[in-house]
Amino acid sequence: MKKVLTLCLVLVIGMMMVFAGGQSDETYPNRNISVVVQFSAGGPTDLSVRGLLDSSEGATFAVENVTGGAGLIGLTKVATAPTDGYTLGCINVDLAINYVMGRTEMSPLDFIPLGCSIFDPYTLVVRADAPYDTMEEFVEYCKAHPGEVIIGDSGVGAAPNLCAAAIADFFDIEYRLVSYDGSADCVTAAVGGHIDGTFTQLSPAKGQLEAGGLKAIACVANERMSAWPDIPTIKETYPDIDFEFVGWVFVSAYKGTDPAKCEYLEGVLGEASQSEMFQEKLASLSMVNTVMTTEEAQQFCADQIELYKEILTNLNLI
């Protein structure tokens, strides 16, 4: 009798375990999904990602800020975590650049993009008293005063630095590049008169643009930003410019994650990215995003890698 009872108990426990396992797959997600942000809390990436996750329905997310190594430490944590759909990361333009420059073997193509939190073009902002108000006037001034204009950036090889270098190369102009710790420091330096301007996403410059301490000349994009519709694009004046510089972020899973879970998350985050709640959040931050399917985002990442290969080769940086 004891043997029969023991056998029955084992069978019941086994059935419960099987049922629990099936339940776990069928009810994904049944616990918090960790999203690793490789930059500090309060920065543009962090704020946009939190806004996207807070606007989502159908899953509960918890942000974990893991900084260091130009963002590579956080991304490495995602790449080495179990691919069970409970650890996501954020791929961005910096990863594409670092990959092309040989600083990491991780590529944006190793990840599965699920939702875009930010898609902000870089914009030339200058001191309010600068003697130029348009891109055409800026180019003419730089040609007439070679080496006199000082442009701030956030370090050699970072997106603002490459943007400034590519613009100088395209227009055959010469200005001095001075590096700071980040875009916010460049904005402060421009307002203080230490530099003449910087190429930046506009959220760090919003306060000074509204207060009149800085003015925006043009964005390095194909289309005007919905958050700043009065700022022209460089392409409007110079249609042959064949590149744009955009600060982009995609919340992503690592390769090998169950396609069904990725499809579910793509739906959740794709809907959130278009929601009124998230768009209001972006507008309050003076940011914009875009909507892409996973397949479209993967193609975009591949195109970005090729773009930076070409730009870095032209600038003799690789």
Image: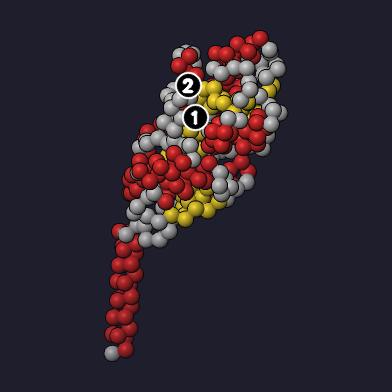
Residue tagged 1: 121
Q: Residue at x 31, y 62 (%)?
A: 22
Query: Disc 1 vs disc 2: Cβ atoms closer than 8 Å?
Result: yes
Q: Is residue 86 above or below residue 185?
A: below
- Placement of 267 over or under 293, stated as above or below: below
Is residue 262 something that shows in the picture? no
Q: Quadrant of the C terminus?
A: top right
Q: Return the disc, 1 or 2, that comes first in the chain's sequence.
A: 1
**Mark 1 against mark 2, which lies toward the viewer?**
2
**Label 2 sits on what residue type?**
Thr
Displayed quadrant of residue 224: top left
Residue 51 in percent (x, y) is at 45, 47
Residue type pointed to by label 1: Pro
Identity of the residue drawn at 32% across and 89% down = 2
- Element carrying mark 2: loop
Q: Residues within 10 Å of mark 2 (few under 14, many from 20)?
A: many
Q: Residues within 10 Å of mark 1 (few under 14, many from 20)?
A: many
> Could you tell me residue 286's position as x and y percent?
48, 37
| Outermost residue to the front | 211
**Vertical placement of residue 298 versus 315, above or below:** below
**Point 56% across, 49% down: residue:** 41
Task: Work out whether residue 102 or residue 12 is closer to the camera in this orientation and state it.
Answer: 102
